[in-house]
Amino acid sequence: MADYYEFSHVLYKNDDTPGWQLARISGTENAVEKKCKKLFPFFVYFPVIGTEPIEDEYPVTLSPNYVFTFFDWNYSKELKKWFLPDEEIPYPKSKCEKADKFKINYSVPARKNKIDELIEQYNDWMEEDRTTMFSIDTEITLSTPDTSVKHGMFFSFHSLGKLEMFIGSTIKNGFGVYNADEDDLFKFLAWKKDENIIRFKIQDYSKDSKVTELMDVEIPLVTFIAVFECFFNKIVTKHAEILTQIKETQVKK
């Protein structure tokens, strides 16, 4: 029987400035908490069980792929720090692209959205949770005059809700994050610079070494609202059309 070792990933900081660094501390939850109280003025720990013993180490790095899959932390490239889901990342001070035009195009390839497979998804969710749930596999392209990013993107009712909250939070609160489904491994981040400008980023968490940024641009607020709301409405409509197709196909069978 394999040995198991308890440890924690710990987000810590030495003052109350925004963002956290990462530590790896061995021991049970109680042991980790006692160590952290001696080491760090501020900390949050996340217990893990591993198959190999580890030594206490800080600061450390962690694969963005792993972070995206198991945690909801967001990363600031400028500060080189992690942020908890309910924390706002300060507006970046770095330079970025400035554009008046911004577009989102999408397609729903039939080869990736076979009706039999979607029906199977739908039935599995209904059987397990009595929930109407399935994901459509889309290909989206986000573009400005100088940058174009093409990416796969899954949409379920859950992810559509998250996209709607991202748009609303950016407009109302001045900051928003969209976490794509775990298979997609990317995020949208947006800040309202002022009443006229939005800064928008696409972060890629698929690499093991570091978070990379595929797009970083300032665009007019009215453009951000128009493009994202139009995209959201089109995806919702397409999702509803496929749901109708699923139900009609089941009736015929």
Image (cartoon, rainbow, N blue to C red):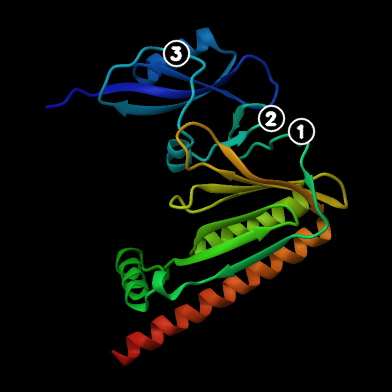
Give amino acid for label 1: Ser
Residue density around tag 1, few if under 14, some if 14–19, many if 20 or more, within 10 Å: few
On the image, which quarter does residue 203 sit in?
top right
List the residue tagged with mark 2.
78
Q: Is residue 223 left or right of residue 37?
A: right
Tell whether label 2 touches label 1 (CB within 8 Å). Answer: yes
Q: Is residue 172 left or right of residue 44?
A: right
Q: Which of marks 3 and 1 is nearer the N terminus?
A: 3
Residue depicted at 46% across the width and 83% down the height: 244
Residue depicted at 11% across the width and 27% down the height: 1
Residue density around tag 3, few if under 14, some if 14–19, many if 20 or more, within 10 Å: few
Point out which mark residue 133 bears: none
The front one of 87 and 237 is 237
Q: Is label 1 in a helix, a strand or a loop?
A: loop
Q: Is residue 185 above or below residue 91?
A: below
Q: Can residue 19 be seen in this view?
A: yes
Point out which mark residue 57 bears: 3
On the image, which quarter does residue 148 sit in?
bottom right
Residue depicted at 58% across the width and 72% down the height: 236
Residue most extreme to the top: 38
Q: Which of marks 2 and 3 is nearer the N terminus?
A: 3
Residue 249 percent location from the top left of the image: 36, 86
List the residue tagged with mark 1.
94
The front one of 92 and 1 is 92
Q: Is residue 43 above or below residue 99?
A: above
Residue depicted at 31% across the width and 72% down the height: 120
Give amino acid for label 3: Glu
Give amino acid for label 2: Glu
